[in-house]
Image: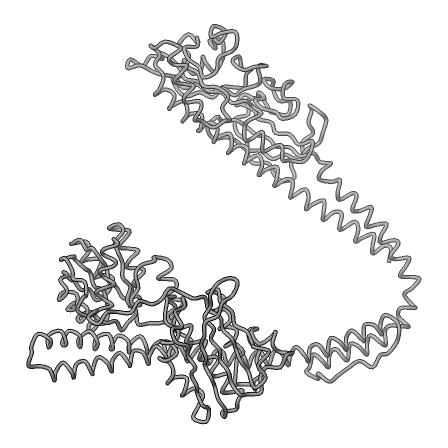
Amino acid sequence: MALVFLGLAFARARERQAAEQKRLGERAQDYAATAARALDATVLQAQILLESATKVVDPAAAPEQNDARLRALFERIPPVFSNINVVDSLGRNIGAARLPADGRERVNISDRAYFKQALSTGRFTVGVPVRGRSLANAPWVLPFLLPLVNESGRVVAMTGASIQLDSLDAVVTSRQLPQGSVLTVLDSNGIVVIRTLNGDGWIGRPFPNYEEGQRTLGPLGNDTTINSEIDAVDRLFGGATTTRAKWRLFVGIPVDVVFGPSRVQFTQDLILGLLISFGIVLIGYWLTARFVAPIASLTMDAMAISEGDMSRRSSIDTDDEVGTLAKAFNQMADAIVERNNQLAESQAQLRQAQKLEAVGSFASGIAHDFNNYLASIIGSGELALAQARDSADRVGTRAEIESMLSSAKRAAELTRQILVFGRRPVVSAAVFDVNTALRGMQRLLSRLVGERVTLRYELAADLGSARLDVGQFEQIMVNLAVNARDAMDGTGQFTVRTSLCQRPNGDFLRIEAEDTGPGVPESLRDQIFDPFFTTKERLRGTGLGLSISYSIIDSCGGSIAVDASYTAGARFVILLPVGVPVPQPSANAADDLPDGRGERILLVDDDPGVSRVAERLLQRAGYQVSRAANGTQALALMDDQTFELIVTDVVMPEMSGSQLVREAVKRHGPIPILFCSGYPDDDVLTEELGTIAPGFLAKPFTRSLLLRAVRDLLDRG
């Protein structure tokens, strides 16, 4: 046993050593490559800076004038640069962003090798680090020069810049390496340009490990270990070459960092293995004799559970660890049975919710086409009615048309109520009269509760208005009516009562929904508004109705609760904040419709019946209208002429209304938008209207609604 652990410890140590060597070797290589890229980026940045400096300096101007220009440029460049200057062809300073305290005359770089190189080549030159003469304490700086050449090809001046070595990204990056690591940069002659350890002693000197005259440097392997003649430390090295300055970079990580953790791990593993071996020898027989049989029995029980025998339980009843494990196993089996039962119930609720979702989707699909048909019927009817009004001998015709329009509007209202029942209404908060809304859905509620349930209204006079989406309000009342019907088992009385009440935080509309059923037990009052909580039988409810109602009412600042004082059944009390009173339309409102002023309107709808009727309504009102059957045609029309307003359907094939609007705005700039839709899908309309925030008109619309919406958008611009 001890030999096995010894072998495992040795293998783990070797494996970790190899992994650490590979990891740190790759890290050294990566840091070398990163440092090379950083130096190349610095050289490129300096070249771009000096090209900018050549455009602002004037070798013939006074040095003080060049000083001011370079200072202005210096304030806008990255802080890594320590100075910008300009010198003449003799190396004398004729302008600088920063001057030494003892004057301009001290700055003369004619003796610098990089100055002589730039003067002879006439090209951008990267120098080797030197002591900065313009900065306090003369730190090591990396200089750059860019000659200014006149028309005859002679160098008349040079712009220069410098960066302190400690500020270079390559140097900063190397500080993230393990302690004792070193970054060394050599020029093409093997001279040390940068060294992060003992840099003052090595910058400008030949590097001991560097082969003199070497001109190429291949990538070092991850196991390249070099003993440094500088500090006698073995390091794992990675190398790279810069592309602009043709420098060599070496990044070395001490070998002790690589092998230290594996040596410590080997010792720990060896000691632990010996202790474990000794302990196993002592307790092995006792463990085998006492636990093998009970564990085998428990294993058989677990296999039976896994094969579906959920009634199988362990018979082990001891006070030791195995007995505790057997008790935990039995508790786990009981919990699995309970979870399976809950899962089956949740799946049944989910299937019921999916059925309701399917009903809503089906109703939405029908409403899309049906509302388009109604829009065409209502629009054509209103056009015919307007023409009939011009003739005094067509009284009978007007009456027939008005009857047709009345029937079409009732059909539109019926469609909206079907969508409310299917939980697919278009959400659009507005101020509405609560009593009027309740009266409008009286027939729907009467059919929902059934013939054996009496529907009773007790509506207070002059109740007032609330701000809420009418469809959502109707959905709340539908949910309460269905719950009351199920609670009364189809027989009893359902009462809807309204009144005004005052609270410390303002005036509220009080709406009571009261039934004569068994009521809500006190133990369930805190749970009835939770999602998927229901007391109904399986497949008869999802537990979502009251939860949805609570969310809707809470979002508008209201509340819903069970009246605990009512004992003859269940009474739900809804409080809604009082809204601004709804203005009543005047008797001749239809005759006071706003006229157009010749504005150009683009009408986009894939239903030709709707688009033709809307075109005639708008033209009759004084607008210039162009029709398009899809987004592609609409964009083509916009390329040829200018429009003051786009009236577009939301859901169209190939290109939706929002996609059309975004493309139109991208091409031609902002323009007023009026969306029209008969497709009441909350997700679609929320995305379309919330993203673009245009005007919206639900189908089917009347002439009055269309003309007022168009006029309002045009007047608001």
Q: Is residue 501 positioned above or below 481 on the image? A: above
Residue 507 x %, y %: 46, 65
Q: Is residue 207 positioned above or below 134 on the image? A: below
Q: Is residue 325 left or right of residue 192?
A: right
Q: Quadrant of residue 198?
A: top right
The colour scheme used here is: one colour
At x 16% / y 57%, what residue is drawn?
A: 599
Check the picture and name the quadrant holding the N terminus: bottom right
Return the residue nearer the eye: 170 or 662: 662
At x 30% / y 64%, what residue is drawn?
A: 696
Return the residue nearer the eye: 158 or 683: 683
Return the residue nearer the eye: 287 or 75: 75
Q: Quadrant of residue 30?
A: top right
Return the residue nearer the eye: 584 or 195: 584
At x 35% / y 72%, what residue is drawn?
A: 680
At x 48% / y 19%, what residue is drawn?
A: 83
Residue 242 x %, y %: 50, 30
Q: Is residue 441 left or right of residue 42?
A: left
Residue 67 x %, y %: 41, 14
Q: Is residue 625 left or right of residue 79?
A: left
Count of number-bearing discs: 0
Q: Is residue 673 positioned above or below 409 on the image? A: above
Residue 380 x %, y %: 17, 75
Q: Is residue 425 left or right of residue 24?
A: left
